[in-house]
Image: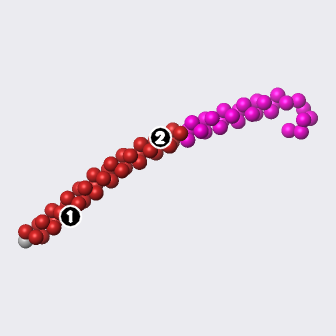
Amino acid sequence: MNADLDALDQGISLLIGWTEQLRSDNSLLRQQLAAAQAENQQCTDRANTARARLEALIAQLPAGTGF
């Protein structure tokens, strides 16, 4: 009986350890995701700014330049 309880206790302890590790990993992944999303938004903003600048420059080109 004691061996069964000891095995159960070890199993529960192992599950608790895994749960704590998964929570920690999940928290880290959430932080990394937020950082990646922020970086993606910055890249999108820069690309949109560059596109707008290029469109403005193209609009200033004289007609008949082949563009």
Image quarter in which the C terminus is found: top right
Residue 52 in which image quadrant: top right
Quadrant where the N terminus is found in the figure:
bottom left
Q: Residue furthest right?
A: 64
Which disc number belongs to residue 35?
Answer: 2
Q: Which residue is mark 1?
A: 11
The percent position of residue 40, horizontal first and vertical second, equals 55, 41
Three-letter code, disc 2: Ala
Q: Is residue 5 left or right of residue 59?
A: left
- Badge 1: how crowded within 10 Å, few (<14), some, or many (20+)? few
- Of helix, strand and loop, which one carries label 2? helix
- Residue 43's quadrant in the figure? top right
- Give the CA distance from mark 1 to mark 2: 36 Å
Write down the region rendered in magenta.
Answer: 40-67
Residue 66 pos. (x, y %): 89, 39
Q: Amino acid at mark 1?
A: Gly
- Asked whether 54 falls inside the magenta stretch, the response is yes
- Residue drawn at the location 56% of the way across and 38% of the way down: 41
Residue shown at the point (12%, 66%) measured from the top left: 6
Check if mark 1's residue and mark 2's residue have beta carbons within 8 Å. Answer: no
Left or right, residue 33 beside residue 3:
right
Dot 1: what SS?
helix
Task: Pick whichever of labels 1 and 2 is earlier in the sequence.
Answer: 1
